[in-house]
Structure formats: C-alpha cells, structure tokens
Amino acid sequence: MELFELAREILPHSDKTIEHQYGLWLKDKGAEPDRAYEQLQKALSSSDYPQAESSERSEHIHTSLAACVVAQAKKGTKTVETALSEVQEHLRQAQSPSFFNPHTTHVFGTLLLELAQMRSRTEDSDVHLQAVAEALPAIEAAFQMIGASGRRIPRFEKSIEMLISLQQRLLDTIEDVATISEMAKNLFEEKRNQIGFVVVARKMLFDAMRQGKGRNYRVVKEYLDECFMIVREAGVLPSERLFAVRVDLYVRWQLQGIGGTVDWKTIRTDLEHLCSSPRYKDDAVKLFYLGVALFQCDSIPEANAIFSRLRASTSHSGLKGGARIYLLGKEGAPKRLQGVLRKAHDRWYIEIGELGIDVLVRNAGVNLVDGRSEHCYVGFSFQGPFATLRRPIGDDLLLAV
C-alpha cells in the first residue's frame, strides 16, 4: 500500500494504471470493497501518464468495478438486486466495437454466476434468472465473435475451454425445462417479466446445439413462437432479450445449413429491431448479421452501409478478415454465382451480373485472366463481402464455436 501511495505522490499527474492497481489492491489485499469501488471510480476518470508506453483501457476498469460490486454484495454493504443491476451496467460499459476479450466475458459470467447463487430460486427467482439471462447471451456472443475459424487461433483456446465450462455451470443452476417453464409463465402472469421465457429458450437452444438436429431447433422455435404470442396477447412488447434469443437460434440453426430454407425476412426484422435499441446498437456481431441479412434480401446499399460502419469501428486483430458466412441460395447452401474477372489498381474484382455489383476477389491464385468468365461464391467478413473462386466446404460453413 505504501508503494502505491508513494507512486501517487511522486507522479505530477494522476496515472490511470496506478489508480487502477491501487483499487485492485484495496479489493483483494485490503479486503475493503467499498473503498476499492471509490478508488476504481477515480481510476476510471483519471488519464494515462503522458509518458506511459501503453494506456489502461476503461473496459478493464469496468471489469474490476464489477468484481468490486460482487464483493460488496458478499460483505452485505450492497443488496444482491442492486449488485446485479450495477454488474449488468459495467458489463455493457466493458463491451465496445473496438474491444473484444473473451477473458473479460468469462470474468463477468463468473461474477453473474456468483450473484445467481446468492439467491436461491425459491427466495428470489427474479435475481437468479436475470443473472443467468445476462451471462448466457454474453458467452454466446463471445463464441460468435470468435467464430469457427477463431478456434484455430492459439490465444483463444484456453478462453474457449473456460467459457464452455462456465456456460455449463450456469445451465446447471437451472432446473429441468418443464419446471422452469412453469416458473416462467407464473413470473410473466404476476409481474409481466419475460426473463423466465428467455432463460428457458436459452437452455433449450443449448440442448439443441448439443444434439445438432433440425428437429431440436424446431422445438426451440415453437417455444419462442408461443412466448411471443403470450406476450403480445397480453398487450406487452416482446423484450430485446427475447428477440436476441430468436436471432441466436437462427444463427445456430438455419445459417449453418441445419434448417434448410432460411427465413431471412424474420432474421432481418429481428436484427433491425435489435440494432435500433440502446443495448445492441453497437453490437458488432448483431450488426454483422444485419449486414448479411440485408445483402440476402437484395438491400445491398444498406448492407454496405452496415459493413462500412463495422470497418470503422471494429479492430479485433485476427477476426476481421475471415469469411464467417457465405451468400446462401434458397436451399440454404452457399450460392454459386457467375461473373467476369476485372483487374484494377493491382486488385482483382469479379463483376456479378445477378447482383449488379463488382466484388473484390480474395485467395484467387495466380491463373487469373482479365475478362474471363468464372464461377464464384460470395463470403462475408467484418470488412464486408468478397468473392472466392473456391467452393466452401466443411468447416468453412461453421459460424461459431
């Protein structure tokens, strides 16, 4: 502690990193979560030392603040309900288009699990369900951000293992689907709270993903259709979380070719609704799939605007350029297109008459001839659409971990 105090006195400017580390010391070694929280808030408003080689990210400080909130709840200086609300807010502040760290997702998920376990389901089902409903989609978002190709990036291997384990631990806190479904109905009837529907749907989606069968995904869709009907018949708008579950269902089911024909209209409508909301307006994964859905619905200028926005806001090294999904045909498989090769400014493009656009060609090899007709497939990355002359197969068609 004396070292921290000395450093803070010596430096002519308040340093964000030192203020952050001092707050962590107060929380972990000093066991003073209330003082630590105040100190971490000071760190959040501090600036980096002018000669510092690297900057302390605010997202990391929000992660520390969330851990401090849970420590306060354990100590009894903050109610579990208040702690849950504050952790949720810090989670939102720790997420940004320019920052992705699966370890941070694991930390928040673990904190939410701790809060869920502080309240038994009989004592306060709302807190337990809200904590689980916050953690599970955060983990799913991390899996979708990493993508199937991200599994081959060494730095993600440990994080993936930890997130899979945490996901299972969260799901283990939920009773069987029949019991929790009844609880969800009662919660909605009594309080108009849709969180129970969301948790049931998330658990069903996880089970369907493990089975990997179209019929299991259809059961999830039928349940969600029922939830939307119940909510709307009660004169209530479906929650953003309910829309988000349905989007994740379509991503895991139809966009990976398990469900055959893709319901692009519903996907587009749901994503437009989500991306216009405060919670999801900067969500890179949701915006990416909105861009894809718009392209699939022949709204190509609107799709390009979304991809332009993503290019400007995302900076996830190793994740931006790889194909995450391909333009799909009516049967749900990658669509084979025909176009004419053109070279401009040392780059190859293919003019696709059916789409009415020129698309950058990637990984094309050396045997290209200007003006020659070629078959191609259109892939989508965070940077936008591109053409490949190679037919995507196998793992190319997987979307997430």
Image: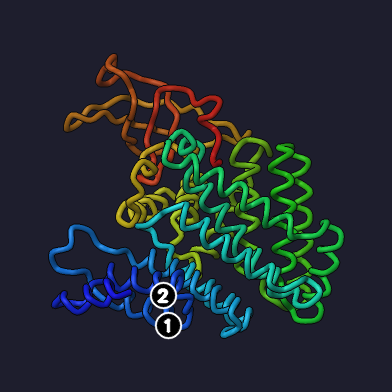
Badge 2 marks a residue whose secondary structure is helix
Q: Image point 54% across, 29% down: which residue?
A: 395
Q: Residue 244 falls in which quadrant of the image?
A: bottom right
The Cα atoms of the two marked residues, 1 and 2, are separated by 7 Å
- Is residue 297 visible from the viewing direction of this image? no
Give the number of marks.
2
Badge 1: residue crowd in 10 Å (few <14, some 14–19, many ≥20): some
Between 345 and 136, the one nearer to me in the picture = 136
Quadrant in the picture for the C terminus: top right
Mark 1 near mark 2, Cβ–Cβ under 8 Å? yes
Instruction: Point out the residue furthest to the top here.
Output: 367
Question: Residue 334, how many percent across, how many down?
Answer: 53, 31
Badge 2: residue crowd in 10 Å (few <14, some 14–19, many ≥20): many
Question: Residue 253, how many percent across, how many down?
Answer: 65, 43
Between 79 and 31, the one nearer to me in the picture = 31
Instruction: Point out the residue furthest to the bottom here.
Output: 77
Question: Residue 377, how many percent across, how many down?
Answer: 45, 29
Horizontal relation, residue 291 to residue 267: left or right: left
Up/down of 360 relative to 67, above or below: above
Amino acid found under the numbered disc labelled 1: Arg
Between 221 and 350, the one nearer to me in the picture = 221
Q: Which residue in the protein does label 1 denote?
A: 35
Q: Image point 55% across, 35% down: which residue?
A: 398
Q: Which residue in the protein does label 2 denote?
A: 26
* Residue 80 disc label: none
Between 279 and 121, the one nearer to me in the picture = 121
Q: Image point 63% across, 79% down: which residue?
A: 80
Up/down of 211 relative to 308, above or below: above
Amino acid found under the numbered disc labelled 2: Leu
